[in-house]
Image (cartoon, helix red, strand yellow):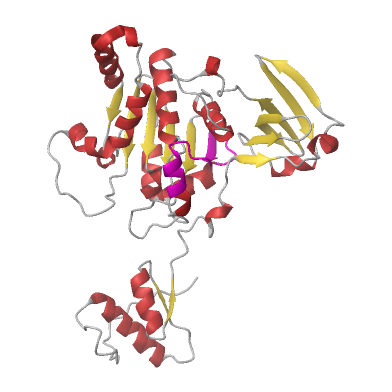
Amino acid sequence: MGRLLVQTTELSAELPKTLPVGKADNQILGVVFALSKLHPDREVALVSKDINMRIKARALGLLAEDYFNDQVLEDRDLLYSGIMELPPDFWEKNSKGIESWQQGGSTYYRISGPAVKDMMVNQFVYCETGIPLIAQVLEVSGRTAVLKTLRDFSHNKNSVWGITARNREQNFALNLLMNPECDFVTLLGQAGTGKTLLALAAGLSQVLESKQYSEIIVTRATVPVGEDIGFLPGTEEEKMAPWMGAFEDNLEVLNKPDPSSGDWGRSATTDLIRTKIRIKSMNFMRGRTFINKFLIIDEAQNLSPKQMKTLITRAGPGTKVICLGNLAQIDTPYLTEGSSGLTYVVDRFKGWPHAGHITLQRGERSRLADFASDNL
């Protein structure tokens, strides 16, 4: 329990003449410089989120540090991926006390062995050597775990609103998105991995086909990449429309009606879909409650942990929340991969029986987008 001291007395500091005295940053640097001269026996450090100010301090020979208290993880590579590859000798080491049974079209395995200690509830495990296995961890108690085989969404008979999984991770993601017991899903991945398309297809399927939710609500962080273009005219939905280009693009892919239905049929289908999708601004979320809704939060990497908490606590009975994002595309000032709200919720929700997370690996947009993601 340290002491908080407020600097009220004026300190004279000899900063280089090239640093203007009027700027607040330079005045703070002056105080740090003077304190380090006043207390040569003590370590005086500047703590700031502003990297430019830290560079200035280092150039003056002062100790400067980042603010680490809001960092969930030091390194993005340590973030929970939701997927675990089982060792090649998995069946040899775990086959002795294994139990298996079938129920509701799925096969269940109860295993106990060394692999269990690293497993978490709703994590996906796979083994490609020997007897192939792709399963989801249903429960973990001590050194025993129950695994359940997955529904294969890569097959046309299990397509979701006409969309099939193109790789293993997309199959895992659709198993979470279509699972009514899973209230909170986070999907991470670079550009073109299919996050928005999978979430929207699952939403349309469960709103219009199975009627599990009443409507889809879409929101996103409105942080511009370049210069802001100023105020936007219109209602709340009209102001949000320019930010929702990603959803418009994906709706075009998903809205492929029967060619024999003609222009009238296509128009009717589009109108029906649009009546079930609401676009909301985050600015007016405080105090709201969403009941029986499919809530998609896009570009969630630009949210702080506090904003993320505000949005997720809007969920009422029967609501499912989906967070999509790419930690390599953070546009919010002073927010890093370690302190992003998306990193925060992935870390806090791992292992909860009603939440799931998948990091999508392979880009499926185009060969150009894949090459650009890897090489630029």
Q: Check the image and name the residue furthest to the top.
A: 260
Relative image position of residue 185 (x, y in whole percent): 49, 34
Relative image position of residue 243 (x, y in whole percent): 26, 39
259 or 74, which is in the foreground? 259
| Position of 80 relative to 355 (above/below) | below
151 in the magenta segment: no
Residue at left offset 45%, top offset 58% = 70
The part of the image, by quadrant, that contains residue 376 is: bottom left
22 or 154, which is in the foreground? 154
Instruction: Mark yes or no: residue 317 visible.
Output: no
Q: Check the image and name the residue furthest to the left.
A: 233
Residue at left offset 45%, top offset 40% = 367
182 or 290, which is in the foreground? 182
Relative image position of residue 16 (x, y in whole percent): 28, 90
Q: Check the image and name the residue furthest to the front.
A: 367
367 in the magenta segment: yes
Residue at left offset 26%, top offset 81% = 27
Boundaries of the magenta span: 350-372
192 or 172, which is in the foreground? 192
Q: Check the image and name the residue furthest to the right.
A: 96
Q: In the picture provided, is 178 more to the left or to the right than 248?
A: right
The part of the image, by quadrant, that contains residue 335 is: bottom left
Instruction: Mark yes or no: residue 4 visible.
Output: yes
Residue at left offset 36%, top offset 26% = 253
| Position of 11 relative to 252 (above/below) | below
| Position of 24 relative to 18 (above/below) | above
Q: In the picture provided, is 277 more to the left or to the right than 338?
A: left
